[in-house]
Amino acid sequence: MRTRVWAGGEEGRVWEWRKVRPAGVAEDREGLDEVPFQERHLRCVWFDPAYRPMDLTTVDGEPVIVDQPGRWNLEAGPDFLDARLRIGTPGRCLNGDVELHIHPEDWIRHEHGADSRYRRVVAHVTYYERRVDPACLPPGTVQIALRGPLRKCPSFSFETLDLTAYPYALRTVRAPCAERLAVWPAERVAGFLETAGLERLSQKTARMRQVIGLQGADQALYEETLAALGYKSNRRPFRLLAQRISRRLLAEESQGDSDRAYALLCGVAGLLPTAIRSEWDEETRRYVRRIWDHWWKFQARHSALILPREAWCLSGLRPANHPLRRLAVAALMFGSPGGPDDEWSAVFRKPVGDWAANLTAGWSRMAPESYWRTRYGFGGQRAVAPVALLGPDRQAAWIVNILVPWAMAAGRWIPAEDAELRDLPVEEANTLVKQAAVNLLGADHNPAIYRSSLCRQGLIQIFSDFCLNQAADCGGCAMRRELEKG
Ligand code: SF4
Protein backbone atom coordinates (compact mmCIF):
# COMPACT_ATOMS: atom_id res chain seq x y z
CA MET A 1 0.00 0.00 0.00
CA ARG A 2 1.15 3.50 -0.71
CA THR A 3 1.54 6.43 1.72
CA ARG A 4 -1.86 7.20 3.14
CA VAL A 5 -3.31 10.59 2.56
CA TRP A 6 -6.46 11.83 4.08
CA ALA A 7 -8.79 13.05 1.40
CA GLY A 8 -11.25 14.46 3.88
CA GLY A 9 -9.98 18.04 4.09
CA GLU A 10 -10.82 20.94 1.87
CA GLU A 11 -10.96 20.30 -1.83
CA GLY A 12 -7.47 19.83 -3.14
CA ARG A 13 -6.04 19.46 0.34
CA VAL A 14 -4.57 16.14 1.42
CA TRP A 15 -3.05 15.33 4.79
CA GLU A 16 -0.62 12.60 5.52
CA TRP A 17 -2.11 10.53 8.29
CA ARG A 18 1.17 10.16 10.12
CA LYS A 19 1.60 13.91 10.39
CA VAL A 20 -1.72 14.14 12.23
CA ARG A 21 -1.22 11.16 14.54
CA PRO A 22 -0.09 12.00 18.06
CA ALA A 23 3.60 11.79 18.90
CA GLY A 24 4.85 9.45 21.59
CA VAL A 25 4.77 6.13 19.75
CA ALA A 26 7.99 4.28 20.51
CA GLU A 27 9.56 1.05 19.36
CA ASP A 28 11.79 -1.09 21.48
CA ARG A 29 14.08 -2.38 18.79
CA GLU A 30 16.06 -4.55 21.15
CA GLY A 31 13.26 -6.77 22.31
CA LEU A 32 9.60 -7.24 23.20
CA ASP A 33 8.82 -8.23 19.60
CA GLU A 34 9.77 -4.79 18.33
CA VAL A 35 6.13 -3.81 18.64
CA PRO A 36 5.36 -0.09 18.51
CA PHE A 37 3.95 1.01 21.85
CA GLN A 38 2.58 4.14 23.46
CA GLU A 39 2.42 5.50 26.98
CA ARG A 40 -1.01 3.94 27.22
CA HIS A 41 0.62 0.50 26.99
CA LEU A 42 2.76 1.38 29.99
CA ARG A 43 -0.29 2.59 31.91
CA CYS A 44 -2.01 -0.77 31.25
CA VAL A 45 1.10 -2.66 32.42
CA TRP A 46 1.28 -0.58 35.61
CA PHE A 47 -2.45 -0.89 36.30
CA ASP A 48 -2.96 -4.60 35.59
CA PRO A 49 -1.33 -7.06 38.03
CA ALA A 50 -1.47 -9.71 35.29
CA TYR A 51 1.10 -7.68 33.32
CA ARG A 52 2.92 -5.66 35.99
CA PRO A 53 6.24 -7.41 36.73
CA MET A 54 6.66 -8.74 40.27
CA ASP A 55 10.34 -7.89 40.51
CA LEU A 56 10.21 -4.12 40.17
CA THR A 57 13.01 -2.06 41.65
CA THR A 58 13.80 1.62 41.80
CA VAL A 59 16.63 2.84 39.59
CA ASP A 60 18.68 2.80 42.83
CA GLY A 61 18.08 -0.95 43.17
CA GLU A 62 15.54 -0.91 46.02
CA PRO A 63 12.74 -3.49 45.70
CA VAL A 64 9.25 -2.11 45.00
CA ILE A 65 5.98 -3.69 46.10
CA VAL A 66 2.84 -2.22 44.58
CA ASP A 67 0.01 -2.56 47.09
CA GLN A 68 -2.27 -0.32 45.04
CA PRO A 69 -1.32 1.06 41.59
CA GLY A 70 -3.69 4.00 42.05
CA ARG A 71 -6.92 5.12 40.40
CA TRP A 72 -6.71 5.53 36.63
CA ASN A 73 -6.98 9.28 36.04
CA LEU A 74 -9.09 10.15 33.01
CA GLU A 75 -8.59 13.87 33.43
CA ALA A 76 -5.54 16.14 33.28
CA GLY A 77 -2.77 15.49 35.84
CA PRO A 78 -0.82 12.42 36.90
CA ASP A 79 -1.74 9.09 35.30
CA PHE A 80 -2.71 7.39 38.59
CA LEU A 81 -3.98 8.92 41.81
CA ASP A 82 -3.63 7.67 45.37
CA ALA A 83 -1.25 4.78 44.79
CA ARG A 84 0.29 2.82 47.68
CA LEU A 85 3.83 1.47 47.33
CA ARG A 86 6.36 -0.13 49.66
CA ILE A 87 9.99 0.62 48.89
CA GLY A 88 13.09 -1.20 50.12
CA THR A 89 13.52 -3.78 52.88
CA PRO A 90 11.89 -3.35 55.32
CA GLY A 91 9.41 -1.48 53.17
CA ARG A 92 8.81 2.22 53.71
CA CYS A 93 5.34 3.27 52.58
CA LEU A 94 4.69 5.82 49.87
CA ASN A 95 1.17 7.14 49.31
CA GLY A 96 0.50 9.47 46.41
CA ASP A 97 0.26 9.81 42.64
CA VAL A 98 2.14 8.05 39.85
CA GLU A 99 3.22 9.51 36.51
CA LEU A 100 4.33 7.32 33.60
CA HIS A 101 6.44 8.14 30.58
CA ILE A 102 8.27 6.19 27.91
CA HIS A 103 11.38 8.35 28.26
CA PRO A 104 12.42 9.65 31.71
CA GLU A 105 13.25 13.04 30.20
CA ASP A 106 9.57 13.51 29.30
CA TRP A 107 8.98 14.69 32.87
CA ILE A 108 11.14 17.72 32.12
CA ARG A 109 9.95 18.08 28.54
CA HIS A 110 6.31 18.22 29.68
CA GLU A 111 7.21 20.73 32.41
CA HIS A 112 5.50 18.72 35.14
CA GLY A 113 7.89 20.17 37.72
CA ALA A 114 6.19 23.57 37.38
CA ASP A 115 2.66 22.12 37.39
CA SER A 116 0.99 22.01 40.81
CA ARG A 117 -1.15 19.02 39.81
CA TYR A 118 2.00 16.87 39.93
CA ARG A 119 3.11 17.84 43.45
CA ARG A 120 1.68 14.65 44.98
CA VAL A 121 3.65 12.39 42.63
CA VAL A 122 5.60 9.77 44.61
CA ALA A 123 6.70 7.52 41.73
CA HIS A 124 7.94 8.36 38.23
CA VAL A 125 7.56 5.15 36.23
CA THR A 126 9.25 5.03 32.84
CA TYR A 127 10.00 2.46 30.20
CA TYR A 128 13.66 3.31 29.72
CA GLU A 129 16.06 3.15 32.63
CA ARG A 130 17.72 6.53 32.46
CA ARG A 131 17.56 8.60 35.66
CA VAL A 132 16.05 12.09 35.92
CA ASP A 133 17.83 14.57 38.20
CA PRO A 134 15.92 14.03 41.51
CA ALA A 135 15.85 17.81 42.03
CA CYS A 136 13.39 18.06 39.10
CA LEU A 137 10.91 15.68 40.80
CA PRO A 138 8.81 16.22 43.95
CA PRO A 139 10.98 15.44 47.02
CA GLY A 140 11.23 11.71 47.79
CA THR A 141 9.87 10.59 44.40
CA VAL A 142 11.17 7.15 43.42
CA GLN A 143 12.10 6.35 39.82
CA ILE A 144 11.08 2.94 38.47
CA ALA A 145 11.92 1.56 35.02
CA LEU A 146 9.79 -1.17 33.43
CA ARG A 147 11.93 -2.27 30.52
CA GLY A 148 14.34 -4.59 32.36
CA PRO A 149 11.68 -6.52 34.31
CA LEU A 150 9.39 -6.75 31.26
CA ARG A 151 12.16 -8.18 29.13
CA LYS A 152 12.60 -10.95 31.70
CA CYS A 153 8.99 -12.13 31.07
CA PRO A 154 9.24 -14.36 27.98
CA SER A 155 5.49 -14.34 27.34
CA PHE A 156 5.15 -10.57 27.50
CA SER A 157 4.57 -8.57 24.37
CA PHE A 158 2.97 -5.13 24.12
CA GLU A 159 0.86 -6.63 21.38
CA THR A 160 -0.93 -8.90 23.87
CA LEU A 161 -2.36 -5.88 25.69
CA ASP A 162 -5.91 -4.99 24.77
CA LEU A 163 -5.72 -1.23 25.22
CA THR A 164 -9.45 -0.81 24.96
CA ALA A 165 -10.08 -3.11 27.93
CA TYR A 166 -8.82 -0.37 30.25
CA PRO A 167 -10.57 2.86 31.20
CA TYR A 168 -11.04 5.56 28.64
CA ALA A 169 -13.03 8.77 28.81
CA LEU A 170 -16.65 8.41 27.76
CA ARG A 171 -18.03 11.49 26.07
CA THR A 172 -21.50 12.55 27.01
CA VAL A 173 -21.60 15.77 24.99
CA ARG A 174 -21.08 15.98 21.23
CA ALA A 175 -17.33 15.81 20.53
CA PRO A 176 -15.67 18.66 18.60
CA CYS A 177 -14.83 16.35 15.67
CA ALA A 178 -18.49 15.31 15.41
CA GLU A 179 -19.46 18.98 15.04
CA ARG A 180 -17.11 19.30 12.08
CA LEU A 181 -17.90 15.99 10.41
CA ALA A 182 -21.65 16.59 10.71
CA VAL A 183 -21.53 19.08 7.85
CA TRP A 184 -19.61 16.79 5.51
CA PRO A 185 -21.49 14.71 2.91
CA ALA A 186 -21.69 11.00 3.84
CA GLU A 187 -19.32 9.94 1.00
CA ARG A 188 -16.67 12.33 2.23
CA VAL A 189 -16.96 10.99 5.79
CA ALA A 190 -16.75 7.41 4.46
CA GLY A 191 -13.65 8.34 2.42
CA PHE A 192 -12.07 9.84 5.54
CA LEU A 193 -12.78 6.67 7.54
CA GLU A 194 -11.46 4.48 4.72
CA THR A 195 -8.20 6.40 4.69
CA ALA A 196 -7.83 5.77 8.41
CA GLY A 197 -8.72 2.11 7.77
CA LEU A 198 -5.97 1.83 5.15
CA GLU A 199 -3.54 3.30 7.67
CA ARG A 200 -4.60 0.65 10.18
CA LEU A 201 -4.01 -2.14 7.67
CA SER A 202 -0.70 -0.60 6.74
CA GLN A 203 0.37 -0.61 10.41
CA LYS A 204 -0.78 -4.18 10.86
CA THR A 205 1.18 -5.21 7.78
CA ALA A 206 4.31 -3.43 9.03
CA ARG A 207 4.04 -5.17 12.38
CA MET A 208 3.48 -8.52 10.71
CA ARG A 209 6.58 -7.88 8.59
CA GLN A 210 8.58 -7.43 11.79
CA VAL A 211 7.19 -10.64 13.26
CA ILE A 212 7.98 -12.51 10.05
CA GLY A 213 11.52 -11.15 10.22
CA LEU A 214 11.90 -12.57 13.72
CA GLN A 215 10.03 -15.87 13.39
CA GLY A 216 9.72 -16.69 9.69
CA ALA A 217 6.51 -16.46 7.69
CA ASP A 218 5.03 -19.85 8.64
CA GLN A 219 5.53 -19.49 12.39
CA ALA A 220 4.32 -15.89 12.29
CA LEU A 221 0.99 -16.84 10.71
CA TYR A 222 0.59 -19.80 13.06
CA GLU A 223 1.40 -17.89 16.24
CA GLU A 224 -0.68 -14.85 15.34
CA THR A 225 -3.61 -17.08 14.37
CA LEU A 226 -3.47 -19.04 17.61
CA ALA A 227 -3.24 -15.84 19.64
CA ALA A 228 -6.31 -14.55 17.79
CA LEU A 229 -8.16 -17.81 18.47
CA GLY A 230 -7.65 -17.15 22.18
CA TYR A 231 -9.73 -13.96 21.89
CA LYS A 232 -9.47 -11.60 24.84
CA SER A 233 -9.46 -14.14 27.66
CA ASN A 234 -6.94 -16.66 26.40
CA ARG A 235 -4.63 -14.79 24.04
CA ARG A 236 -1.60 -15.35 26.23
CA PRO A 237 -1.90 -19.13 26.76
CA PHE A 238 -2.68 -19.63 23.06
CA ARG A 239 0.45 -17.67 22.14
CA LEU A 240 2.51 -19.60 24.67
CA LEU A 241 1.19 -22.83 23.22
CA ALA A 242 2.18 -21.75 19.71
CA GLN A 243 5.68 -21.01 21.01
CA ARG A 244 5.98 -24.36 22.82
CA ILE A 245 4.54 -26.38 19.93
CA SER A 246 5.96 -24.53 16.96
CA ARG A 247 4.45 -24.78 13.53
CA ARG A 248 7.31 -26.99 12.43
CA LEU A 249 6.99 -29.33 15.43
CA LEU A 250 3.24 -29.56 14.91
CA ALA A 251 3.74 -30.47 11.25
CA GLU A 252 6.36 -33.12 12.12
CA GLU A 253 4.27 -34.73 14.85
CA SER A 254 0.88 -34.51 13.19
CA GLN A 255 2.01 -35.96 9.84
CA GLY A 256 -0.94 -34.32 8.17
CA ASP A 257 -3.48 -35.86 10.57
CA SER A 258 -5.60 -33.20 12.27
CA ASP A 259 -6.55 -35.60 15.13
CA ARG A 260 -2.87 -36.04 15.96
CA ALA A 261 -2.40 -32.28 15.77
CA TYR A 262 -5.39 -31.76 18.06
CA ALA A 263 -4.09 -34.34 20.56
CA LEU A 264 -0.70 -32.63 20.72
CA LEU A 265 -2.14 -29.13 21.09
CA CYS A 266 -4.72 -30.13 23.73
CA GLY A 267 -2.20 -32.30 25.58
CA VAL A 268 0.40 -29.54 25.83
CA ALA A 269 -2.37 -27.05 26.62
CA GLY A 270 -3.12 -29.27 29.65
CA LEU A 271 -6.79 -29.32 28.70
CA LEU A 272 -7.45 -32.93 27.74
CA PRO A 273 -10.10 -34.54 29.96
CA THR A 274 -8.39 -36.92 32.39
CA ALA A 275 -11.19 -39.51 32.43
CA ILE A 276 -14.02 -40.74 30.26
CA ARG A 277 -17.24 -39.55 31.85
CA SER A 278 -20.11 -41.98 32.28
CA GLU A 279 -22.66 -39.42 31.01
CA TRP A 280 -20.90 -39.01 27.66
CA ASP A 281 -22.46 -40.61 24.59
CA GLU A 282 -20.64 -43.30 22.62
CA GLU A 283 -19.41 -40.95 19.88
CA THR A 284 -17.78 -38.67 22.46
CA ARG A 285 -16.16 -41.60 24.28
CA ARG A 286 -14.74 -42.94 21.03
CA TYR A 287 -13.42 -39.51 20.05
CA VAL A 288 -11.79 -38.79 23.43
CA ARG A 289 -10.19 -42.29 23.44
CA ARG A 290 -8.82 -41.67 19.94
CA ILE A 291 -7.31 -38.33 20.98
CA TRP A 292 -5.83 -39.89 24.13
CA ASP A 293 -4.34 -42.74 22.05
CA HIS A 294 -2.35 -40.12 20.13
CA TRP A 295 -1.47 -38.10 23.23
CA TRP A 296 -0.05 -41.17 25.05
CA LYS A 297 2.58 -41.41 22.35
CA PHE A 298 3.44 -37.70 22.47
CA GLN A 299 3.35 -37.35 26.23
CA ALA A 300 6.81 -38.69 27.02
CA ARG A 301 8.43 -36.36 24.52
CA HIS A 302 6.46 -33.22 25.33
CA SER A 303 5.26 -33.45 28.93
CA ALA A 304 7.80 -30.83 30.05
CA LEU A 305 5.98 -28.31 27.83
CA ILE A 306 2.52 -28.75 29.36
CA LEU A 307 0.89 -25.49 30.42
CA PRO A 308 -0.59 -25.29 33.92
CA ARG A 309 -4.37 -25.29 33.95
CA GLU A 310 -4.30 -21.95 35.76
CA ALA A 311 -2.85 -20.41 32.59
CA TRP A 312 -6.33 -20.65 31.06
CA CYS A 313 -9.41 -18.60 31.67
CA LEU A 314 -12.24 -21.13 31.33
CA SER A 315 -15.10 -19.56 33.23
CA GLY A 316 -17.75 -17.40 31.66
CA LEU A 317 -16.87 -18.42 28.09
CA ARG A 318 -19.44 -19.01 25.39
CA PRO A 319 -19.23 -22.73 24.44
CA ALA A 320 -18.19 -21.81 20.87
CA ASN A 321 -15.20 -19.90 22.27
CA HIS A 322 -13.93 -22.64 24.59
CA PRO A 323 -10.23 -23.31 23.96
CA LEU A 324 -10.92 -27.01 23.35
CA ARG A 325 -13.09 -26.06 20.39
CA ARG A 326 -10.75 -23.33 19.16
CA LEU A 327 -7.83 -25.76 19.26
CA ALA A 328 -9.79 -27.94 16.84
CA VAL A 329 -9.72 -24.99 14.42
CA ALA A 330 -5.96 -24.60 14.92
CA ALA A 331 -5.42 -28.34 14.37
CA LEU A 332 -7.45 -28.21 11.19
CA MET A 333 -5.70 -25.11 9.86
CA PHE A 334 -2.16 -26.18 10.63
CA GLY A 335 -2.25 -29.94 11.12
CA SER A 336 -4.10 -31.07 8.02
CA PRO A 337 -2.72 -31.89 4.63
CA GLY A 338 -3.03 -28.77 2.52
CA GLY A 339 -3.44 -25.97 5.04
CA PRO A 340 -1.87 -22.62 4.31
CA ASP A 341 0.50 -23.86 1.66
CA ASP A 342 -1.99 -25.59 -0.65
CA GLU A 343 -5.54 -24.80 0.29
CA TRP A 344 -4.80 -21.16 1.06
CA SER A 345 -2.61 -20.49 -1.96
CA ALA A 346 -5.69 -21.04 -4.09
CA VAL A 347 -7.56 -18.54 -1.93
CA PHE A 348 -4.95 -15.84 -2.53
CA ARG A 349 -5.59 -16.07 -6.27
CA LYS A 350 -9.23 -15.05 -5.77
CA PRO A 351 -10.59 -11.53 -5.19
CA VAL A 352 -10.40 -10.69 -1.48
CA GLY A 353 -14.18 -10.43 -1.34
CA ASP A 354 -14.38 -14.18 -2.11
CA TRP A 355 -11.87 -15.33 0.50
CA ALA A 356 -14.36 -15.96 3.28
CA ALA A 357 -16.59 -18.21 1.15
CA ASN A 358 -13.60 -20.09 -0.26
CA LEU A 359 -12.07 -20.65 3.18
CA THR A 360 -15.37 -21.88 4.60
CA ALA A 361 -15.68 -24.36 1.74
CA GLY A 362 -12.06 -25.39 2.34
CA TRP A 363 -12.58 -26.09 6.07
CA SER A 364 -15.62 -28.23 5.24
CA ARG A 365 -13.66 -30.20 2.66
CA MET A 366 -10.75 -30.71 5.05
CA ALA A 367 -12.83 -31.94 7.98
CA PRO A 368 -16.11 -33.38 6.74
CA GLU A 369 -16.37 -35.77 9.71
CA SER A 370 -14.89 -33.66 12.51
CA TYR A 371 -16.45 -34.27 15.93
CA TRP A 372 -16.48 -30.51 16.41
CA ARG A 373 -18.72 -29.88 13.40
CA THR A 374 -21.71 -31.07 15.45
CA ARG A 375 -20.58 -30.31 19.03
CA TYR A 376 -19.87 -27.27 21.17
CA GLY A 377 -18.12 -29.25 23.91
CA PHE A 378 -17.23 -32.78 24.97
CA GLY A 379 -20.44 -34.69 25.57
CA GLY A 380 -22.64 -31.74 24.63
CA GLN A 381 -25.79 -32.39 22.64
CA ARG A 382 -25.23 -33.28 19.01
CA ALA A 383 -26.31 -30.36 16.79
CA VAL A 384 -28.83 -31.25 14.11
CA ALA A 385 -27.09 -29.17 11.44
CA PRO A 386 -23.30 -28.76 11.12
CA VAL A 387 -21.85 -25.97 13.25
CA ALA A 388 -19.22 -23.74 11.65
CA LEU A 389 -15.82 -24.39 13.21
CA LEU A 390 -15.11 -20.70 12.87
CA GLY A 391 -18.25 -18.56 12.65
CA PRO A 392 -18.56 -15.99 9.83
CA ASP A 393 -17.82 -13.04 12.12
CA ARG A 394 -14.73 -14.62 13.69
CA GLN A 395 -13.52 -15.69 10.28
CA ALA A 396 -13.97 -12.16 8.93
CA ALA A 397 -12.01 -10.79 11.91
CA TRP A 398 -9.22 -13.31 11.28
CA ILE A 399 -9.06 -12.48 7.56
CA VAL A 400 -8.94 -8.72 8.17
CA ASN A 401 -6.62 -8.69 11.17
CA ILE A 402 -4.29 -11.61 10.51
CA LEU A 403 -4.52 -13.19 7.07
CA VAL A 404 -4.54 -10.05 4.93
CA PRO A 405 -1.67 -8.31 6.81
CA TRP A 406 0.28 -11.58 6.78
CA ALA A 407 -0.32 -12.19 3.06
CA MET A 408 0.80 -8.64 2.22
CA ALA A 409 3.81 -8.76 4.55
CA ALA A 410 4.90 -12.17 3.26
CA GLY A 411 4.39 -11.11 -0.37
CA ARG A 412 1.78 -13.82 -0.88
CA TRP A 413 -0.90 -11.35 -1.96
CA ILE A 414 -0.73 -7.69 -2.88
CA PRO A 415 -3.91 -5.82 -3.81
CA ALA A 416 -3.71 -4.35 -7.30
CA GLU A 417 -5.08 -1.11 -5.83
CA ASP A 418 -6.26 0.08 -2.43
CA ALA A 419 -9.87 0.08 -3.64
CA GLU A 420 -9.75 -3.74 -3.65
CA LEU A 421 -9.61 -3.62 0.15
CA ARG A 422 -13.12 -2.15 0.16
CA ASP A 423 -14.32 -5.72 -0.42
CA LEU A 424 -12.81 -7.11 2.80
CA PRO A 425 -15.30 -9.22 4.76
CA VAL A 426 -17.14 -7.21 7.37
CA GLU A 427 -16.54 -7.80 11.08
CA GLU A 428 -19.27 -7.26 13.60
CA ALA A 429 -19.40 -3.65 14.82
CA ASN A 430 -18.02 -4.25 18.32
CA THR A 431 -18.36 -1.86 21.24
CA LEU A 432 -15.17 -0.07 20.25
CA VAL A 433 -16.43 0.63 16.73
CA LYS A 434 -19.75 1.80 18.14
CA GLN A 435 -18.10 4.06 20.72
CA ALA A 436 -15.79 5.54 18.07
CA ALA A 437 -18.80 6.11 15.79
CA VAL A 438 -20.63 7.97 18.58
CA ASN A 439 -17.53 10.08 19.22
CA LEU A 440 -16.98 11.03 15.60
CA LEU A 441 -20.45 10.96 14.11
CA GLY A 442 -22.67 11.81 17.06
CA ALA A 443 -25.17 9.64 18.92
CA ASP A 444 -27.82 9.95 16.19
CA HIS A 445 -25.61 8.92 13.24
CA ASN A 446 -26.57 6.56 10.44
CA PRO A 447 -24.60 3.26 10.90
CA ALA A 448 -24.69 2.73 7.12
CA ILE A 449 -21.79 5.22 6.92
CA TYR A 450 -19.44 2.61 8.38
CA ARG A 451 -20.90 -0.54 6.98
CA SER A 452 -17.66 -1.51 5.18
CA SER A 453 -14.82 -3.30 6.91
CA LEU A 454 -12.39 -0.55 5.90
CA CYS A 455 -14.53 2.16 7.55
CA ARG A 456 -14.77 0.07 10.74
CA GLN A 457 -11.01 -0.35 10.75
CA GLY A 458 -10.75 3.41 10.31
CA LEU A 459 -12.98 4.08 13.32
CA ILE A 460 -10.79 1.83 15.46
CA GLN A 461 -7.64 3.57 14.19
CA ILE A 462 -8.96 7.03 14.99
CA PHE A 463 -10.17 5.88 18.38
CA SER A 464 -6.77 4.33 19.20
CA ASP A 465 -4.75 7.27 17.89
CA PHE A 466 -6.82 10.07 19.37
CA CYS A 467 -9.79 9.25 21.61
CA LEU A 468 -8.16 6.64 23.86
CA ASN A 469 -5.58 9.02 25.19
CA GLN A 470 -7.75 12.10 25.55
CA ALA A 471 -9.58 13.51 28.52
CA ALA A 472 -13.34 13.95 28.15
CA ASP A 473 -13.03 17.53 26.85
CA CYS A 474 -10.86 16.41 23.85
CA GLY A 475 -8.64 19.38 24.72
CA GLY A 476 -5.33 18.13 23.30
CA CYS A 477 -6.66 16.17 20.33
CA ALA A 478 -4.58 16.66 17.18
CA MET A 479 -7.46 15.47 15.02
CA ARG A 480 -9.66 18.18 16.46
CA ARG A 481 -7.03 20.81 15.69
CA GLU A 482 -6.69 19.60 12.08
CA LEU A 483 -10.43 19.54 11.55
CA GLU A 484 -10.74 23.03 12.94
CA LYS A 485 -8.32 24.26 10.28
CA GLY A 486 -11.04 23.43 7.79
S1 SF4 B 1 -10.48 12.83 21.07
FE1 SF4 B 1 -10.45 13.82 19.07
S2 SF4 B 1 -11.16 12.26 17.61
FE2 SF4 B 1 -11.75 11.59 19.71
S3 SF4 B 1 -13.81 12.39 20.04
FE3 SF4 B 1 -12.42 13.96 20.82
S4 SF4 B 1 -12.07 15.37 19.11
FE4 SF4 B 1 -12.95 13.48 18.27
Image (tube, rainbow, N blue to C red):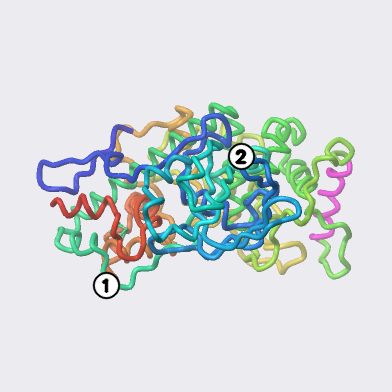
First in residue order: circle 1 vs circle 2: 2
Q: Give how far across and how far down residue 123 sits, in percent.
A: 55, 53
Of residues 91 and 393, the one nearer the viewer is 91
Which quadrant would residue 204 be assigned to in this image?
A: top left
Residues drawn in magenta: 283-296
**Residue positioned 66% across, 48% down in the render:** 53
Name the amino acid, label 1.
Asp
Of residues 425 and 338, the one nearer the viewer is 425
Q: Secondary structure at mark 2?
A: helix
Q: From the viewer's perspective, is residue 283 above or below residue 229?
A: below
The local crowd at label 2, few if under 14, some if 14 to 19, many if 20 or more residues have their Cα within 10 Å, is many
Of residues 172 and 200, the one nearer the viewer is 172
Q: Residue furthest left?
A: 11
Q: Which mark, residue 223?
A: 2
Name the amino acid, label 2.
Glu
The local crowd at label 1, few if under 14, some if 14 to 19, many if 20 or more residues have their Cα within 10 Å, is few
Q: From the viewer's perspective, is residue 94 above or below residue 2?
A: below
Q: Viewed as shown, does residue 278 lie left or right of 354?
A: right
